[in-house]
Image (cartoon, coloured by chain):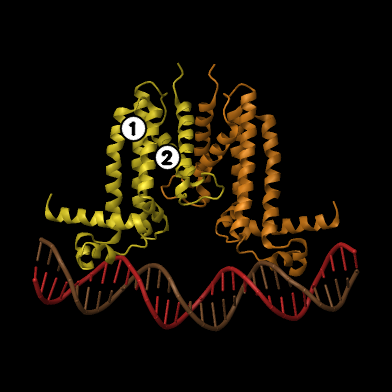
Chain colours: A orange, B yellow, C red, D brown
Amino acid sequence: MNAVDDKRNQIIEAALKRFSHFGIAKTTMSEVAEDLQLSKANLYYYFPDKFSLIEAIAYRIIDESDTTVEKAFGEAKDTLDLLFRILDMKKAYFEKYYMLTLNLHEMNINEDKWKGLAKNLFQREVDTVSRVFKQGIARHELVTFDVASTSELYVSMMRGLAMFCDRATPLALIDRDELARMFEKQKQAAAIIINGLREKE
Amino acid sequence: MNAVDDKRNQIIEAALKRFSHFGIAKTTMSEVAEDLQLSKANLYYYFPDKFSLIEAIAYRIIDESDTTVEKAFGEAKDTLDLLFRILDMKKAYFEKYYMLTLNLHEMNINEDKWKGLAKNLFQREVDTVSRVFKQGIARHELVTFDVASTSELYVSMMRGLAMFCDRATPLALIDRDELARMFEKQKQAAAIIINGLREKE
DNA sequence: TGTTTGACTTTTTCTAAAATTTGGTCAAAA
DNA sequence: TTTTGACCAAATTTTAGAAAAAGTCAAACA
């Protein structure tokens, strides 16, 4: 790893620390720079703007979580168990980076950049679910179906469940103490969905 | 029907016309009164506040739609067909009262009153789905399961699908020209869910 | 030549006051 | 009992100025 990449990593870590403690909106670029005893101008040498820093952090976390997903693929005994493990992983990350997710909503970075990032993160979730479904089909645990559209459906439903957990009015971000209940509901839903896709013996 | 009820109905109809054309937020009580050539003060003689007028309209529509649901119960050949018919009905209403639903979100009437109404409307949807499920179980089409919690799950997932239809960032209200696609997705989801609850022969 | 910075500009956010609209009330009239 | 004009109060919008934060750049540094 070269010196520039190393510095970029230091910045990402410092920013992540502040972001997940105080939230993205309430953390300034100057503060991140100060934490590393850099000037703000120098920080901008490594990241062209605040958004690209946020973006780098987002992908860092997703990449890290993907290793956990990989482990789950190796350990799970069947498709539903695999989805449950992935949900458990997501719960752990959600709790750990709660402030981060919180502020994703109350930010008003350039609308287009924001949507682009959200779309990519959504797609990566869909891709993971696609892999799960494909494996289930290959093992003759699930019937054959349109994996791409069904994966999208699955992720959309899970996100919807997160917004409408125990409430009639949608909430951008669920309270911290409702997280456990929300994930229970998601598991319940996953069980029904997988059952609906299962091959009859 | 007495004179007061008759007047209240006239007001509801006039208000509904304006609300579904311009939206709730951008319709003033004075305008509704003018349409009927009443004074604003007189309008307030029949409805104590704007919210109670909105509420009356909401229940009027739901009650009306319930007769369509009733018909669907009589005509549907099985559980999934019944859910499809209910979704078709909802689509028709959604299109008809599009501006109305739109403004439900961007209003900021007293938070508590609002949540109360939203909760009731949500519950009525859940109750309808409960009836569907119970009938399916009674006819041995579906396995036995916790109807109450599963109905809630069903409605939450459907609402979630509405917000995340073809997009990664939630949208309070979907575009008019995406409605058809959204309802297709909801049908797709309903099919999987019902399949997951189906009794094996 | 790649990195760093102080000083600078620009953009966004915050605040508070004024103006305007709209929801809601009431005594009196019909 | 129903209706209304005149009124009040609460919420929304507008505006303008101050403050804060994002982002830039020429010069210095190593």
| Residue A12 pos. (x, y %) | 73, 56
- Quadrant for residue A139, please give it: top right
Direction from residue B20 to residue A169 in the image, left or right: right
Disc 1 residue type? Arg
Neighbourhood count class around disc 1 (C-alpha, 10 Å): few under 14, some 14–19, many 20 upward? some
Identified at 20% across, 60% down, the residue is B46
Q: Front-most of A135 and A9? A: A135
Q: Is residue B189 left or right of residue A88?
A: left
Front residue (pair B18, A160): B18
3D distance between C-alphas at marks 2 and 1: 13 Å
Which type of secondary structure does the marked residue at label 1 adopt? helix
Residue B53 disc label: none
Give, as a three-letter code, the residue at label 2.
Answer: Val
A27 versus A145 height, above or below: below
SS class of the residue under badge 2?
Answer: helix
**Quick check: can you spot residue A50?**
yes
Residue at x-position 42% and y-position 28%: B145
Question: Residue B174: x, y in percent?
Answer: 47, 49
Residue at the image position 55 percent from the left and 56 percent from the top? A105
**Dot 2 corresponds to which residue?**
B155
Quarter of the rendering containing residue A99: bottom right
Q: Are marks 2 and 1 on the same chain?
A: yes
Which dot marks residue B131?
Answer: 1
